[in-house]
Amino acid sequence: MVEGSQNIDALLTEDRRFPPPPAFQEQANVNDPGVYEEAAKDPEGFWARFAEELHWFKKWDKVLEWDPPYAKWFQGGKINVSYNCLDRHVATARKNKAALIWEGEPGDRQVYTYWDLYREVCKFANALKGLGLKKGDRVTIYLPMVPELPIAMLACARLGAPHSVVFGGFSSESLRDRINDSEAKILITADGGFRRGRVVPLKENADEAVKGAPTTEKVIVVRRTGTADDQMNPDTDVWWHDLMEGQSQVCPAEPLDSEDILYLLYTSGTTGKPKGIVHTTAGYLLGTYATTKWIFDLKEDDVYWCTADIGWVTGHSYIVYGPLSNGATSIMYEGTPDYPDRDRFWSIVEKYGVTVFYTAPTAIRTFMRWGTEYPAKHDLGSLRLLGSVGEPINPEAWMWYWEHVGRSNCPVVDTWWQTETGMILISPLPGLTTLKPGSATRPFPGIDAEVVDEGGNAVDLGQGGYLVLKKPWPAMLRNIYGDPERFVQQYWSRYPGIYFTADGCKRDDEGYFWLLGRVDDVINVSAHRISTMEVESALVDHTAVAEAASIGRTDDVKGQAVVAFVTLKEEVPASEELMVELKQHVAGKIGSIARPDDIYFTAELPKTRSGKIMRRLLRDVAEGRALGDTTTLADPAVVEALKERYDEDEA
Ligand code: PRX
């Protein structure tokens, strides 16, 4: 039985259907249903045709070399991602088109045309070179949502220096571990960022991290909040604006091999140590380019807004690389949706005439809770297409999005993918697909996805199982940085030669895919991945804790919430204060996204005879099924009694 966070039975009774509005269909970038069959017959030809739309210094010799689990796409080709996102457009009438319209949380604004962005990226690339950065050197970027973030990424890409962006909400320890794992030479940070009216002290965290990260030679600091002017270390720190002064606006893009590393992005898996997902150049660019063009249907005059933070893969692929390679105008917003009021997003949509809007179900559920008056206050008539990403979208949230944001005439594309997949793999094509609320519908053309049982056999339509990918795709991860064994073990060993997604999925009678949530020990909190092991190691790091287990509990807004069960050391009494302290300890160790919503103190943790923590029991406890109203496990007899019941169930 595949367990996921979605309720399968409710999904299967969903019978609402939304065919593409005829006016949308007519103008769509793709409206010929033949694309699916054509791509299935010859996936390599399909991708190669798309690749012709990119700029190549030298064309590839071979589209794909597949030696499972190692794929090489476009071998022999020479290409540069930054060139494709900038120079290519600067050479056309797009030169003075807005590439990025950035709005800071306090309301400040900056517009970068393609030409502006090109010049800033060239200058910063020259600055990096001046600091001795060479092709292949890693750069860690720990920035808030400011324009310098995509500028830094594109500058790295220009030189062939892999970037590793660390979400600004991560703690100093998390940052330190990521710098060390990638042995980055340069760290780019800011004094702070604005979030809900407050300053997030990034520089303090960065300073703390660098103390334990000896490979860091230089720290480049963006001055955003003016809160760290007295914290500059003269030996290592340099202001971004000082560094940029006098730099040449010309920096030729390095012709890179198709398989040169573009970036690393750390994500949580089933162990305590986040893994550095490796993405390479040509295939990744192609995958994000093609999916952006077809799924978001971008046209020359669209105003596209993806609300993700660039610290996550969604921002990498669908704020930076996909939209810019398509020559689109993108909105980038620094802050939270409720500052200064709960209509901030809708005011941005109205102000800039956003046409394509991409966000996460957790945000939609938050908007639902706030009420329809906030979107209703604004003219959202510019919108023509909506997207969802990061977690399963429940049909109620889908319908709310459709009605109250899309005014019942914007297709909603529910896009399934992962940090590892680099690009969207399962999604409607908005001019072709009849939508069903809650379903990501079907694989993108050229993608071979299947739902299989334990033995790897495809399940019948109407059944559930594990989602797998049977053929390589251009933007797929190439490895785990520094840990090739884990790469094989994690993704390719359950079904040899087939990629295991760790997601549960159900096919309906028409073959639509319904994602059911993770089947491993990854918790998906507000569309962000946290591993149960990470939370557990953070807890046992506290002096009061003997043992800890954590699980994801279903949460109406966040999708899942972190819940922890803690056994204290013998001499330590349980208390409210300690609970608060432990929550803070986890947030301090990992970042506030990992802060447990609930902590239960328990005399012992329920384990199977072989010593495995009984997570299903803990989930039932956390969701109020196992213990009824009782919220304490402190009585050892309770755990024993529960265990017996579950042992019987499991037998
Ligand atoms: O469980 C799936 C869920 O998010 C996981 C990937 O998380 P991450 O690597 O952080 O990337 C998030 C942004 C792509 C998946 O294994 N997930 C993502 N999108 C969806 C989803 N679950 C259901 N429906 C989706 N549209």
Image: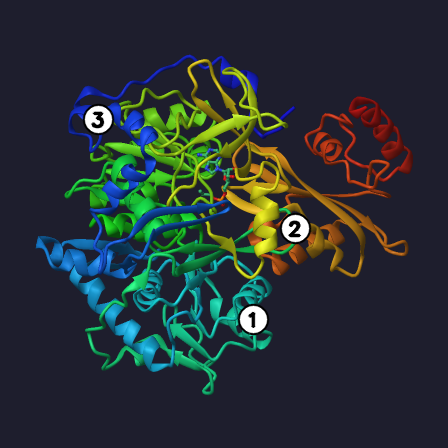
* Residue shown at 28% from the left, 46% from the top: 289
* CB within 8 Å, label 3 to label 1: no
Question: Image height check: is 460 above or below 104?
Answer: above
Earlier-in-chain disc, 2 versus 3: 3
Please identify the quadrant where the N terminus is shown.
top right
Badge 2 density bin: few <14, some 14–19, many ≥20, Cα 10 Å = some
Question: Image height check: is 498 above or below 440?
Answer: below
Kind of residue sitting beneath label 1: Ala
Instruction: Tell me the CA gap for discs 2 and 3.
Output: 43 Å
Badge 3 density bin: few <14, some 14–19, many ≥20, Cα 10 Å = some
Residue 111 visible from this viewpoint: no
Please identify the quadrant where the C terminus is shown.
top right
* Residue shown at 87% from the left, 32% from the top: 638
Mark 2 or mark 1, whichever is nearer to me: 2
Q: Which residue is mark 2?
A: 271
| Image mark for residue 209 | 1
